Image (spheres, grey):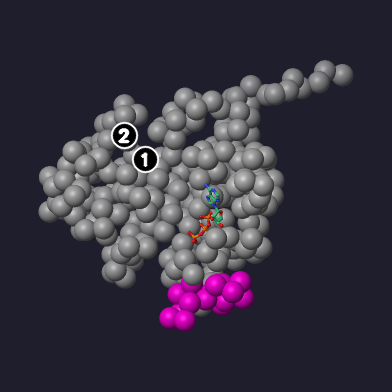
Amino acid sequence: MTRTPYPAKPAQRPPVRHSVVLRDVVKTYRTGATTTTVLDGVTFAFPRRTLTAVMGPSGSGKSTLLHCAAGLDRPTSGSVSVEGTELTSLDEAALTRLRRDRLGFIFQAYNLVPTLTVRQNVTLPAELASRRVADSAARDVLARLGLGGHADARPAKLSGGQQQRVAIARALLSEPAVIFADEPTGALDSRSAAEVLGLLRDAVDDAGRTIVMVTHDPIAASVADAVVFFADGRVVDTLHRPSADAVAARMATLGAARPNGGAR
Ligand SMILES: Nc1ncnc2c1ncn2[C@@H]1O[C@H](COP(=O)(O)OP(=O)(O)OP(=O)(O)O)[C@@H](O)[C@H]1O
């Protein structure tokens, strides 16, 4: 009997159903003689073309998870694959290329280039990946984020919330397969937050992106296809298409409810 050669040629591989896959991911930090386990054997798969919210009490390991999943940090053990590429096997240069070409980031530290204008900042990742962004696409995204009048401004002239929106415009315009977002609406008023969540939803539904979003806000989480709950470095629950009330109720049982109804 002839055996099928393994591994199969790339063209014969089945399509990737899950965009980001973590297998038994452990992350520990050592301070002096003390070792702290921040991720305690996380196994989770984020399906393609979905928006998944990651929630949990402060210090439960959400940002660490995001950094490991996005190739910004390396797990102590376990494996992470993104769009079928095993990150743990890549050297730093290959990881940098993968992040530049396939991933988008919306983080609290906006990482905008101070000497470039808003328009130049948002088109920079695409240009670095040798992709041209149509002027109309840049104009459209900036206008939808309420930044139409600021295209030629430098980031320092903008408020924190406006800078966050520039970071969001930049991630959307670089057309990544996966967008990692850490509290993307944290610095925004409720109207801007709703607009941003709408844009993220469209990026999934219309443009086929996969989004992994850490949030403390049950309303933001209710826009997601699923919410994965974290506690003490482990996945403890997943809710599909939940309401904000269901998310808040689940967070409360994790001991993370805020007196004002939010979560942290
Ligand atoms: N570089 C580091 N060295 C030591 N400990 C760290 C390091 N980075 C994170 N930690 C610890 O790991 C734990 C989880 O941090 P992480 O930022 O992932 O949590 P989080 O759930 O995102 O919290 P928050 O909701 O407050 O942002 C915290 O106790 C933090 O102090």
Q: Name the dominant secondary structure of the magenta segment.
A: loop
Q: How much space separates mark 2 and mark 1, taking CA atoms?
A: 8 Å
Q: Which residue is mark 2?
A: 126
State the residue in front, 235 or 4.
Answer: 235
Is 49 on the left or on the right of 5, as rendered? Answer: left
Q: N-terminal of the two: label 2 or label 1? A: 2
Residue placed farthest to the right in the image? 1
The residue shown at (31%, 64%) is 188
Q: Which residues, given as a range, are shown in magenta?
A: 248-263
Three-letter code for the amino acid on which mark 1 is drawn? Glu
Please tell me how crowded label 1 is: few (under 14), some (14-19), or many (20+) other residues with Cα within 10 Å: many
Q: Is residue 256 magenta?
A: yes
Three-letter code for the amino acid on which mark 2 is drawn? Ala
Q: Can residue 227 be seen?
A: no
For the residue labelled by badge 2, is the local secondary structure a helix, a strand or a loop?
helix
Please tell me how crowded label 2 is: few (under 14), some (14-19), or many (20+) other residues with Cα within 10 Å: some
Mark 2 in CB contact with mark 1 (< 8 angstroms) = yes
The verdict on label 1 being within 8 Å of ligand 1 is no
Q: Which quadrant of the figure has residue 79?
A: top right
Q: Which residue is mark 1?
A: 175
